[in-house]
Amino acid sequence: QHYLDAIKAKDGELNAYVTVTDSEALAQAAQADEQFKAGTAGPLTGIPIAHKDLFCTEGVKTACGSKMLDNFIAPYESTATGNLKAAGMVMLGKTNMDEFAMGSSTESSYYGATKNPWNLDCVPGGSSGGSAVVVAAGTAPASLGTDTGGSIRQPAAFCGITGLKPTYGRVSRWGMVAYGSSLDQAGPMTQTAEDAAMIMNALASFDTKDSTSMDEPVEDYTASLNQSLDGLKIGLPKEFFGEALDEGIRATIMEAVKQFEAMGATVKEISLPRTELSIPAYYIIAPAEASTNLSRYDGVRYGHRCEDPKDLNDLYMRSRSEGFGDEVKRRIMVGTYALSAGYYDAYYRKAQQLRRLIKNDFVAALNDVDVIMGPTTPSPAWKIGAKNQDPVSMYLEDIYTLSVNLAGLPGMSVPCGFVDGMPVGLQVIGNYFQEAKLLNIGHQFQ
Ligand code: GLN
C-alpha cells in the first residue's frame, strides 16, 4: 500500500509506470502476510518489485513501449519474473521503456517520455528508464531491467541507483520480448548492491526453455558481500578516459578509484584498443538481430492490425508502418540492409569478426586484472529532446557499455557522485560468472 500510494502521488509527473497492478499486488501482499504468520516466508516474500514492460507477465499487458503491442496481454509468464514471483515478490506494475528497448533515453516510447526524478527536464537514460526511475523516486524498492547494450547500467547511472547486467546466459531470456538475442540479458535495478544480490539469488537460473541459458550452479550472491578487497587488482582502460569523457565525471571516477586503493586494491592502466569500434559493430549486429526478431509482428498472429486490409501485402505493410515508431523502423532498415545478400560479408560478417576481437581484448585484460573499472557513461543525463532527433549522437553515448554486451561479460553500475546535480555511475566489469565479485565491490563501496 505504501508503494501504491507513492505511485499515485508521484508517477503522474514521472511517467515511469505504464501499468499499475494494484489489486493483484494487494492480494499477493495479503498472501505474503499469511506466509509470515505461518513461518514459511523467505527473504523476498512480500517485497514489491516493478518489471520493465518487456517481460511477459501472465494476464497483464506487455507492450514493450510500442503501439504494435498496445493490445497484447501476455498469455504466459517469463522465467525471470516467474522466478521472482515464486520467491514471493509482489509485482507493482510494468515500467516505461524505449520502444522495443531501442534507445538510451526512454523518449521513444509510445506512452511518452519518462522524466528523471533528479531534474524533470532531463532524460532518465534508457532503454530501462522507467525501471531506473521507480527505484530512484521511491515508487518501488527494486525493479527488473534488460540490457542489450547498456540499458540497465546507463539509466542506473543517470538516476543514481545500482544496476547489474549479468553474464550472458545467467538469467533466462524466455518470455522476454526479443531485441538482439545474442546480447539481451535481464538484471536487477536496486538502491544497493546488497538488494541486487538478494534478487539475483532468485533471478538467476538454468532454463532449458532458453537455448543460451548456461547450466552453471547458481551461487548465493549475498555470501561474499563482505569479503576484503585487499589485493584486488583493478584495471582502468585508457580508452574509457579519452576525449569523449566529461571532465566532472572523470574526476568523480578517479575519486572512487582512490577509495578502492584505500581499501587495499591496486590500480593499473590497461588497454581495450577496440572500444571505439564497439559502436559500429554493435549498431550492425543489434539491428540485424532486431530486424529478424521483429519480423514476427505481421498483423496476423498478434499485435497491431491495420483497418480493412486490401490483401495480405497491404496488411503486412500498413500494420507495420502504423505499429512501429521511427527508431524501430530505422533499425529494421539498417539490419535488413546489413543482412542482405551482397552486403552480408561487408557489414554483418565484419561486425561479427570485430565482436570476437573485442571479446579477446577483454579476456586478455582480465587475465591480468580482477576487474575493470571506468565510467558507465561519457556524460551525465542530458535534456529531454536534446538528442532524439540525431540518432548517431545518441548512439555515441553508449561507448562504454556496448562492448561488455558484445563480449557477454557481467557489468554493474553503482552510484559514485554528482556532476552539476546529476548522478554519476561507476562501471565495474568482471570476468564471466563473477557477479558475486562485482556485487561485493559495489556493497563495500556504498
Ligand atoms: N542504447 C542501445 C540501443 O539503443 C542499448 C539499448 C539496450 O541495451 N536495450 O540499442
Image: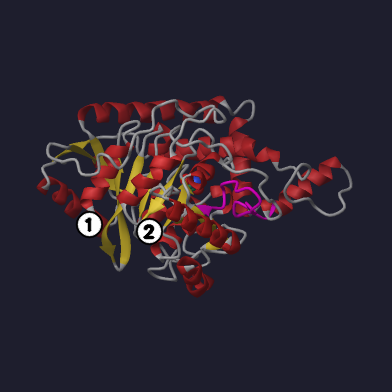
Which portion, as a residue range, is magenta? 50-68
Q: In the image, is residue 63 part of the stretch drawn in magenta?
A: yes
Q: Which residue is mark 1?
A: 252
Q: Is residue 234 magenta?
A: no
Q: Is residue 49 visible?
A: no
Q: Is disc 1 placed on a helix, strand or loop?
A: helix
In the image, residue 378 sits, relative to residue 337, either above or below, namely below
Tell me which residue sits at (58%, 60%) in the image. Answer: 21
Tags 1 and 2 touching, CB below 8 Å: no
3D distance between C-alphas at marks 1 and 2: 14 Å
Q: Which residue bears the numbered disc 2?
A: 158
Can I make out residue 52 in this image?
A: yes
Q: Residue furthest front?
A: 38
For this rendering, which residue is in front, 246 or 381?
A: 381
353 vs 17, left or right, is: left
x and y, in percent, of residue 394 in the image: 46, 53
Whether the residue under disc 2 has CB within 8 Å of ligand 1:
no
Q: Amino acid at mark 2?
A: Phe
Image spot of residue 177 (x, y percent): 59, 43
**The disc label shown at residue 269, or none:** none
Q: Residues within 10 Å of mark 1 (few under 14, many from 20)?
A: some
Residue 279 versus residue 430: which sits nearer the camera? 430
